[in-house]
Image (tube, rainbow, N blue to C red):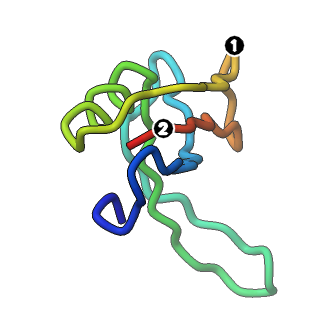
Amino acid sequence: MVSRLVPRGLLYVAVKAQRPGNPEEEIVTENDYGYDYDRFFSYYTLDEMRAHLERLGLSLIHAEVPQAPSPGDWMQVIARK
């Protein structure tokens, strides 16, 4: 995706925020549609996202991180090429 960005182009990413003391990854069984199914989740900290962006040659220009992450909370970041 980064290679498709024009110079100074923006990338928006939303990921599940890491909850202190909880796993970094997990499989959750849900039943929203009348049957059980498994969903895989990875959770990230802002430091992890910043490191990923830097490795890709992007600059973090905005981040919204839940103050006390709970299930369903999303970290939102905008980066510039």
> Is label 2 or label 1 in front?
2
Q: Looking at the image, which residue is at 43% across and 34% down? A: 44
Q: Is residue 18 above or below residue 52?
A: above
The x, y position of residue 5, in whole percent, is 41, 60
Point out which mark residue 79 bears: 2
Q: Looking at the image, which residue is at 54% across and 45% down? A: 15
Quarter in which the N terminus is drawn: bottom left
User: Dot 1: what SS?
Assistant: loop
The x, y position of residue 25, in whole percent, is 37, 45
Name the outermost residue toward the left.
Answer: 55
The x, y position of residue 21, in whole percent, is 45, 17
Q: In which quarter of the view is residue 80 placed?
A: top left
Q: Residues within 10 Å of mark 2 (few under 14, many from 20)?
A: many
> Which amino acid, by three-letter code, is at mark 2?
Ala
Q: Is residue 4 above or below residue 80?
A: below
* Viewer-proximal residue among 72 and 26: 72
Query: What whole-number distance in Å separates the C-alpha atoms at marks 2 and 1?
Result: 21 Å
* Viewer-proximal residue among 24 and 58: 58
The x, y position of residue 39, in whole percent, is 52, 67
Side (left or right) of 8 relative to 58: right
> Which amino acid, by three-letter code, is at mark 1?
Gln
Q: Residues within 10 Å of mark 1 (few under 14, many from 20)?
A: few
Point out which mark residue 67 bears: 1
Q: Which callout, 2 or 1, points at the residue further toward the start of the chain?
A: 1
* Viewer-proximal residue among 20 and 37: 20
User: Dot 2: what SS?
Assistant: strand
Q: Looking at the image, which residue is at 67% across and 25% down? A: 64
